């Protein structure tokens, strides 16, 4: 009952405010006059009576304020009042307001951008999947190895076993983690499309309905179906097929096999794997038809299937894990030679597969921490500014306090102002993030068929909102509390505001914090930038500037070995004939890429009993003649493969220096015989080449052997006399001329290819470098602002000093001393923090230690000069002031 | 006049309700009446009277209407509502209980411990 009465009273009060005000005025005046009349009746003169009445009553404004508060009409009104007043105050000093808003907007914008990536990678569930929290990933863990290499996806026979024998899952699906690049024969022209092979229950377990046609079903998942089915991806259907609704039932020829289109997935669905948006989905059982990789479905050692299951409602993840472990032991018992020491493990199913989440989280966590530090600098700038402003408004606050404003109200007013600043910055920051996220995506190496969507969804917006709120409160609270605490009486007396310059410990602490953070960021940034420079200058052992490459797989179209050979021979001739081409060759896969082939080398002349122990592990590359010429890899001894070696697959090999040194350190290895892997025959060494980089740019020297026996899938290597990018279109044309059914994947220059191994170094250098520059600029502006303010506060004092005989240079020293004290403390703190923190960067750095002395010295010097500069200009202004004016300065 | 007794906010509310229960009054009248029925032993801070009146009205214990004072001037008169009457009763009972308890504690003789 009273709640309703209260609400009515509040409503009445809000709506008829002015009337309420005048009524209250009348009432209170009546009271005072009545009291005065009583006094007058007692003989007190009228004016005296009125005066005493007023004094007895106490502060009428205060009473009115409390009455208003009693009605609780106050809150919304006074808030609106505060907001209006806040805007006016901000407009009064547009320059500093703009500086603070810009700095905060940059901080919030960058943090929001980073968070939107974290959101897209780690927080968002797969789109359009029903109840994703019920899904668990199934992985195999190999004993005896550690780290990311110990976790494996499933083999096909393993998947079938788990699928048929489990009780925990209502459905267990599997899909190929690698996008399959296939050639789509569109009216005689070959075009590369990327698809994902999935089990028949993929769409039903995930609960995906196709608006057009039907999804893949279990019936489609049969080996040897005459017209296998595929489902198209939405964006592929829109882009390449013009959103044609009549596409259901049509044929598509992929890698020489006819497929029937049975449906199109709903917009937004892209599967379960981050950044992979397949153009089509096909059943797992067509894998042998598409890839010509026979035995993939029966191979117990090929681990290629990512497996996800939907938990039954009564089953927990722990129960499921236990059951999977039991099943894995059963498989181990049945197949001890292939499945030894392989245990099952489950993870919650997310876009980034479970075992990799830790690494992604660590990397993005590092970046978020870096941007967070930048935010700290922006906040410190804002706090210093507000502190300075609040001090100059102390008098205004004192008057308000005397008029009856409660302390809480004053604090609220100042907080509202800082929240307004933060709010403006938040809006600007969101706009910045919207623009910046696609910009960051350009750092991705172009050849990867990855599409990462980074939307600004509700999580990101909530993050921005909270970030703005927290920063607003953080930098607004201290000045607000400081001012509200000030003594009223001394401020109201007509004393000059600059009651001497007060050494503010808070202000100094803020400056120190800012300098320390700036030092930390600059050191991190310098290390990453120098590391990138080092990485760029690492010689990979081959020419990166004059080569164009393309990957071809004629075998995927079902060509015979002869047809493949003919194709490549013709292609080689055509490309050789192009102007500007100096050399053409082939390799099975390029170094520094994801593919790797390994073998063990033993010297043939050693007795076989020793061979097992002294085998040298080496990487293998299969190359055509002219490879070393095309890649500009110097041949140190012996000669290149001949065409005959290529055609007849003679057992010859060319090794690199490292392998040569390991096999025969003192003699020329050419002519010696070795045994590679499980070969029965021995192989003759015919040449030695210079060593380079093969797996990563930062690796130690690795032994490598090159052999002439090439598979059908090869990478074309073309050496250009001039700029290789000019050749790309021509190469594509020549491929088309020789065989229009074929299309190349990864047609790019070697420079573009090299962006993949350099990806981590480049990303950190760009991001941290930008951060470092921003930090430097913001710190400079912030310091300059604070020191100018402090110097202006001391103008009176400086005038006194000069009048008393201080020289100009004494004034300069005064200012500089203050600045340098703060700078040295900040610098020391920053360096100490850097020594501790940069250790985490060491895995990302090429050829530079985390505590590289040159970097530390350089940053120290830079910061000191920046502080000196920030001190010098205000000091010069102070030096030039006429002491007479300064003495009169208030 | 005896020394002023310290009045807590809750007791002030109770005093006002009691004063108004004896008949409709304007703000100054409430002040005078409390002084009167306390036999001049209690004087209210004038500044805290009106916020208390507004609060009580907001909570629904009293209601107000404009009328004419003795000297024909406009004044706002406060009246107790039915809810206010019940409230006064509950508060009075609570107060009596409280004073009983405290009197009991203070009157404890050494033998009773």
Image (tube, coloured by chain):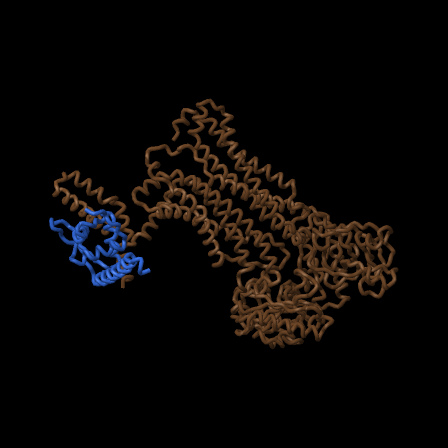
Q: Is residue A515 visible?
A: yes
Q: For residue A199, which quarter of the picture? A: bottom right
Q: Toward the viewer: A34 or A798? A: A34
Quadrant of the frame with the N terminus of chain A: bottom left
- Estimate the x, y position of residue A768 in percent, counting from the top left: 58, 47
- Estimate the x, y position of residue B88 in percent, counting from the top left: 23, 60
- Estimate the x, y position of residue A763 in percent, counting from the top left: 61, 51
At horizontal 51% and vertical 28% (from top left) the residue drawn is A812
Q: Is residue A152 above or below residue B44?
A: below
Q: Toward the viewer: B37 or A668? A: B37
Quadrant of the frame with the C terminus of chain A: top left
- Estimate the x, y position of residue A755 in percent, counting from the top left: 65, 52
In the rendering, what colour is chain B?
Answer: blue
Q: Is residue A644 visible?
A: no
Q: Residue farthest to the top?
A: A805
Residue A574 appears left or right of A518 = right
Q: Toward the viewer: A601 or A333? A: A333
Total of numbered circles in the picture?
A: 0
Q: Residue farthest to the front?
A: B111
Residue A506 appears left or right of A452 = left
Residue B89 appears left or right of A754 = left
Q: Toward the viewer: A877 or A586? A: A877
Residue A806 appears left or right of A607 = left
At horizontal 81% and vertical 60% (from top left) the residue drawn is A615
Q: Chain coloured brown: which letter? A: A
């Amino acid at each position: 009952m009273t709640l309703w009465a209260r609400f009515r009273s509040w409503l009445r009060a809000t709506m008829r405010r002015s009337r309420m005000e005048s009524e209250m005025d009348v009432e209170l005046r009546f009271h005072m006059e009545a009291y005065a009349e009583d006094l007058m009746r007692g003989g007190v003169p009228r004016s005296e009576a009125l005066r005493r009445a007023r004094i007895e009553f106490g502060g009428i404004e205060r009473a009115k304020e409390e009455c208003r508060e009693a009605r609780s009409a106050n809150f919304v009104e006074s808030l609106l009042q505060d907001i209006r007043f806040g805007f006016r105050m901000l407009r009064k000093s547009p320059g500093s307001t703009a500086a603070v808003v810009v700095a905060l907007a940059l901080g919030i914008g960058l943090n929001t951008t980073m968070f939107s990536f974290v959101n897209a990678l780690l927080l968002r569930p797969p789109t359009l999947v029903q109840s994703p929290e019920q899904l668990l990933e199934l992985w195999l863990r190999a004993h005896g190895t550690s780290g990311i290499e110990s976790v494996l996806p499933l083999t096909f026979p393993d998947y079938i076993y788990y699928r048929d024998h489990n009780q925990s899952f209502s459905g267990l699906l599997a899909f190929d983690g690698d996008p399959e690049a296939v050639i789509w024969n569109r009216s005689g022209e070959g075009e590369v499309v990327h698809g994902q092979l999935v089990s028949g229950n993929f769409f039903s377990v995930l609960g995906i309905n196709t608006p057009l046609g039907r999804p893949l079903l279990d019936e489609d998942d049969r080996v040897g179906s005459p017209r296998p089915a595929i489902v198209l991806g939405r964006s592929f259907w829109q882009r390449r097929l013009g959103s044609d609704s009549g596409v259901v039932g049509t044929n598509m020829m992929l890698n020489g096999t006819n497929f029937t289109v049975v449906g199109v997935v709903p917009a937004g669905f892209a599967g379960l794997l981050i950044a992979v948006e397949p153009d089509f989905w096909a059943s797992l059982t067509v894998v042998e038809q598409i890839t010509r990789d026979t035995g993939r479905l029966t191979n117990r050692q090929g681990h290629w299937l990512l497996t996800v299951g939907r938990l039954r409602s009564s089953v927990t993840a722990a129960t499921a894990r236990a059951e999977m472990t039991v099943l894995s032991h059963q498989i181990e018992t049945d197949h001890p030679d292939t499945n030894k020491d392989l245990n099952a493990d489950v993870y919650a199913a997310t876009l980034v597969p479970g075992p990799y989440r830790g690494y992604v989280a660590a990397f993005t966590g590092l970046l978020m921490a870096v941007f967070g530090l930048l935010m700290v600098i922006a906040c410190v700038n804002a706090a210093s500014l507000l502190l300075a402003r609040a001090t100059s408004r102390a008098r205004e606050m004192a008057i308000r306090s005397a008029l009856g404003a409660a302390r809480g109200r004053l604090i609220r007013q100042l907080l509202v102002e800082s929240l307004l600043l933060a709010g403006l910055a938040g809006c600007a920051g969101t706009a910045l993030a919207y623009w910046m996220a696609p910009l960051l995506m350009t750092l991705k190496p172009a050849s990867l068929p990855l599409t990462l969507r980074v939307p600004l969804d509700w999580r990101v917006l909530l993050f921005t909102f909270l970030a703005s709120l927290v920063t607003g409160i953080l930098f607004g609270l201290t000045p607000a509390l400081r001012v509200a605490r000030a003594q009223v009486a001394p401020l109201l007396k007509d004393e000059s505001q600059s009651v001497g310059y007060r050494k503010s410990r808070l202000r100094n602490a803020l400056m120190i914090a800012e300098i320390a953070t700036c030092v930390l960021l600059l050191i991190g940034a310098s290390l990453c930038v120098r590391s990138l420079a080092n990485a760029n200058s690492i010689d990979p052992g081959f020419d990166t500037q004059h080569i164009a490459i393309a990957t071809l797989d004629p075998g995927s179209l079902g060509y015979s070995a002869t047809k493949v050979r003919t194709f490549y021979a013709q292609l080689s001739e055509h490309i050789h004939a192009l102007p500007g081409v100096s050399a053409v060759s082939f390799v099975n896969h390029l170094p520094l890429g994801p593919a790797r082939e390994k073998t063990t080398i033993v010297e043939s002349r050693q007795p076989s009993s020793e061979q097992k122990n002294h085998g040298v592990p080496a990487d293998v590359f299969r190359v055509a003649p002219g490879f070393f010429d095309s890649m500009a890899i110097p041949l140190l001894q012996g000669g290149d493969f001949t065409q005959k070696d290529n055609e007849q697959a003679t057992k010859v090999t060319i090794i690199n220096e490292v392998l040569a040194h390991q096999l025969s350190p003192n003699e020329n290895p050419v002519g010696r015989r070795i045994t590679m892997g499980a070969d029965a025959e021995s192989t003759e060494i015919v040449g030695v080449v210079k060593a380079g980089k093969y797996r990563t740019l930062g690796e130690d020297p690795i032994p490598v052997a090159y052999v002439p026996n090439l598979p059908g899938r090869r990478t074309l290597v073309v050496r250009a006399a001039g700029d290789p990018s000019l050749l790309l279109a021509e190469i594509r044309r020549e491929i088309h001329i020789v065989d229009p059914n074929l299309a190349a994947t990864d047609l790019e220059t070697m420079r573009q290819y090299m962006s993949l191994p350099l990806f981590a170094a480049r990303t950190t250098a760009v991001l941290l470098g930008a951060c470092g520059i921003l930090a430097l600029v913001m710190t400079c502006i912030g310091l300059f602002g604070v020191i100018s303010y402090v110097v202006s506060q001391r103008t009176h004092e400086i005038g006194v000093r000069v009048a008393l005989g201080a020289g100009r240079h004494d004034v300069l020293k005064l200012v500089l001393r203050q600045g340098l004290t703060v700078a040295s403390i900040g610098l020391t703190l920053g360096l100490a923090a850097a020594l501790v923190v940069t250790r985490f960067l060491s895995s990302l750095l090429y050829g530079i230690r985390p505590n590289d002395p040159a970097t530390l010295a350089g940053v120290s010097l830079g910061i000191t000069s920046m502080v000196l500069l920030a001190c010098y200009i205000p000091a010069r202004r102070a030096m030039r002031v006429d002491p007479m004016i300064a003495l009169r300065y208030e | 006049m005896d020394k002023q007794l310290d009045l807590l906010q809750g007791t002030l509310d109770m005093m006002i309700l009691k004063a108004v229960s004896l008949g409709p009054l304007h703000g100054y009248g409430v002040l005078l009446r409390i002084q009167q029925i306390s036999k001049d032993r209690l004087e209210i801070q004038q500044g805290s009277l009106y916020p208390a009146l507004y609060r009580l009205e907001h909570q629904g214990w009293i209601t107000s209407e404009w009328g004419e004072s003795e000297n024909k001037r406009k004044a706002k008169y406060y009246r107790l509502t039915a809810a206010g009457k019940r409230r006064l009763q509950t508060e009075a009972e609570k107060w009596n209980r409280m004073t009983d308890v405290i009197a009991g504690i203070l009157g404890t003789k050494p033998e009773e411990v």
